[in-house]
Amino acid sequence: MHALITAIAAHDEAADFLAWPGDFDLGRGDHVEEVHLASGAALEGFAGDGAGGTYFFCGEGGEERPVLYADSEGGAALLAIGLPELLQLLLVVPWWRDCRALTAEESGEAAADHLEDMPDLAAQRDRAAAVLGLELPPESAVLARLREAAIEKAKDFVLIYTPENTPYEPLFKA
């Protein structure tokens, strides 16, 4: 069952916020390259971004599966354990790509840029979270979960470019 995916598709305001500034679109689940997980676990593209990146569910199951992101430049990272956690990341820190060191300082700088262009970002975010039935944790907790997924759990989610059997580069480093 894909309850959150269905909810996103049913609520334009949530889908619009996730599309921008979240850069997450359910209509872009096809990755441009043939890839697989080094572990051999299943990989299912279910969303993408405007630059050719793809969000993948890893393993078997539903929306509780780990979510891996692969960009179009050969970088990848485990972002979340489950779709609810990914959506919290996209709602609270939609500029996560600009936080390579995963610090509050980086996030604050990126947030300032986004708020300059979108002064009602917090209100839009809160409405999207409400229609999706998600509670929004503090930014520090979201960044800590991203760090845990992308750095501490990453070894179990290595994405391989199949034609050359080479791994994607980690988007975040310890």
Image (tube, rainbow, N blue to C red):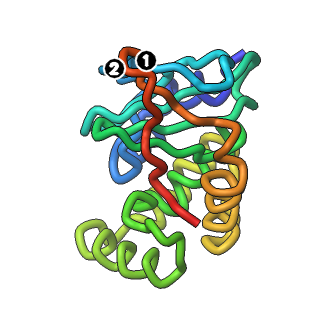
Residue found 44% across the figure and 66% down from its top: 100
Q: Element type at marker 2?
A: loop
Pair 2/1: label in front: 1
Element at badge 1?
Answer: helix
The location of residue 101, given as percent across then percent down, is: 49, 72
Q: Is residue 148 visible?
A: yes
Cβ atoms at labels 2 and 1 below 8 Å apart: yes
Q: What is the quadrant of the C terminus in the image?
A: bottom right
Disc 1: which residue: 162
Tag 2 residue: 33
Tell me: 83 left or right of 18.
right
Disc 2 from disc 1: Cα separation: 8 Å
Front-most of residues 14 and 79: 79
Q: Which amino acid lies under the numbered mark 2 shown in the image of this protein? A: Glu
Instruction: Please tell me how crowded label 2 is: few (under 14), some (14-19), or many (20+) other residues with Cα within 10 Å.
Output: few
Percent x, y of residue 81: 71, 42
- 159 sits left or right of 52 in the view: right
Disc marking residue 18: none
> What's the residue at 37%, 81% (across, down)?
109
73 versus 41 height, above or below:
below
Vertical arrangement, residue 103 with respect to residue 50, above or below = below
Image point 47% across, 67% down: which residue? 122
Q: How many dots with numbers?
A: 2
Q: Is residue 154 above or below residue 42?
A: below
